[in-house]
Amino acid sequence: MTENTDAPAAAPLTVPGFRRDHAAHPPLDYPPYRSTALRHPTRPLKLLPHMLTEVTGPVFGHDRIGDLDHDLTRQRSGEPQGQRIIVHGRVLDAGGRPVPHSLVEVWQANAGGRYRHVIDNWPCPLDPNFDGAGRTLTDADGRYRFVTVRPGAYPWRNHDNAWRPAHIHFSLFGTSFTQRLVTQMYFPDDPLFGQDPMWNAIPDEAARQRLVARYDHGATEPQWALAFAWDIVLRGPETTPFEQEADDD
Amino acid sequence: MPRTTPSQTVGPFLHIGLADDPYAADEGAPGGLWIRGTVYDGAGAPMPDAIVETWQADPDGRFDHPADPRGARTSPGFRGFARCATDADGAYSVFTRKPGAVPGPAGPQAPHIDVSLFARGMLRRVVTRLYFPEDAAARAADPVLSAITDDRERDTLLARAADDGYRFDIRVQGPGETVFFDV
Ligand SMILES: [Fe+3]
């Protein structure tokens, strides 16, 4: 490999960055979630100013999304077991702007709480009609919509009698490298929140509540499916007209 | 204004939803190369349940993205993004082309690739940067690298030349711990 000498001279270039939002997120070192012990950096993170590589990101097109990728109940020959649900909402940035045409990926357990994955082998049946993965693009207004079944809670070995609250894993790209987010959506009033270290790792109670979808009667379809609404907020621009507003994130 | 949605771990079943997409450049692209590495935890054990994502400029230092003030420019057969879950031995590999120098606020940045790492046991992603061994002069002038004063820390961001490209191991914790960034 040789030094790149044929690239055009790079003139200095400043680009608008994204607001940092550390307070919203769980720490990497969180002893009650035991697997963090050997998997958190011990040295302080170094500040990376937002430059071109950070304010850009992959752009995904419709060519990479199949017609039924958003409907996890129609990906096999028959319908999966469980309560059919609609999960929909908007992807926004913290400046309040919709994030259009961005990739949203989801994965989840089946209605009994079992994942179609080689290492998930707790005694709950797989569903031959449920793979548990979906993907879609947000529309011009940042809206997304999935049809799926309500996932079950499932046990894990983190602590005595540990159970994960029912959840759907979400992966979001937004429009820039800085906005990349992987998170989980939960359901209202789950009795399992209190013993869940992933939930408790989020330092602020108000921030935890932002992971809980809302039952949406208006979007519930008669004789067909319950609906849950969940908006996802990615990082916003560093400079907004609301700069003076107090911000604890 | 709405508040940011908190991050959560990808968990152990990440492979279901985050399909591998290891080609940032088409197979057979001119100058195509493999970046291969292993992800290690704080005990030096390979991490078989992690996923590596890479994002970078094209060989001319341009991005196919509206936020590039020089104008989005498509580079045929090149997407700039790849991702690869680690295998049972903690290994990942992505196929790409070498990025060009990218402008920064005070002059060019050395060719680099932004790397995200997600894993079971990580409540949010960590971010690092990969630089290339042959770019000594450009690296010395790079604003991100020059802010790292410890040689050994800086060296953790350096890929090593390999037969079909480069090798870039990531050590999440412990001796040789990779430098991670607050992005
Ligand atoms: Fe899960």
Image (cartoon, coloured by chain):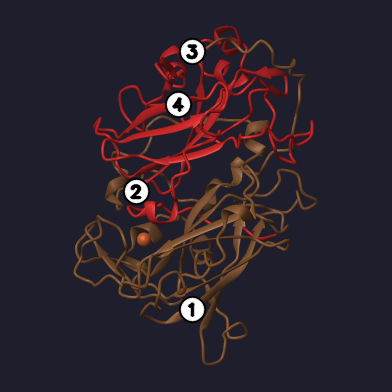
Chain colours: A brown, B red
Quadrant field for ligand 1 = bottom left
Residue B34's tag is: 4
Quadrant of the image for the N terminus of chain B?
bottom right
Q: Which residue is drawn at 26% across and 35% down?
A: B89
Mark 1, residue position: A85
Disc sitting over residue B133 in the figure = 3
Marks 3 and 4, the one that precedes in the sequence: 4
Marks 3/2 same chain: yes
Give x and y (percent) for residue B183. Answer: 56, 37
Whole-percent x, y for residue B149 in the image: 50, 14
Alpha-carbon span between mark 3 and mark 4? 15 Å
Please report, as a chain letter, where disc 2 is located: B
CA–CA distance in space, label 4 to label 2: 25 Å
Q: Mark 2 points at which residue?
A: B120
Give the camera-side residue of B26 and B165: B26
Residue B105 percent coordinates (x, y): 72, 24
Residue contact between numbered discs 1 and 3, judged by CB atoms under 8 Å: no
Disc 3 residue type (three-letter): Pro
Q: Does the residue labelled 1 lie within 8 Å of ligand 1?
A: no
Q: Which amino acid does label 1 sit on?
A: Ile
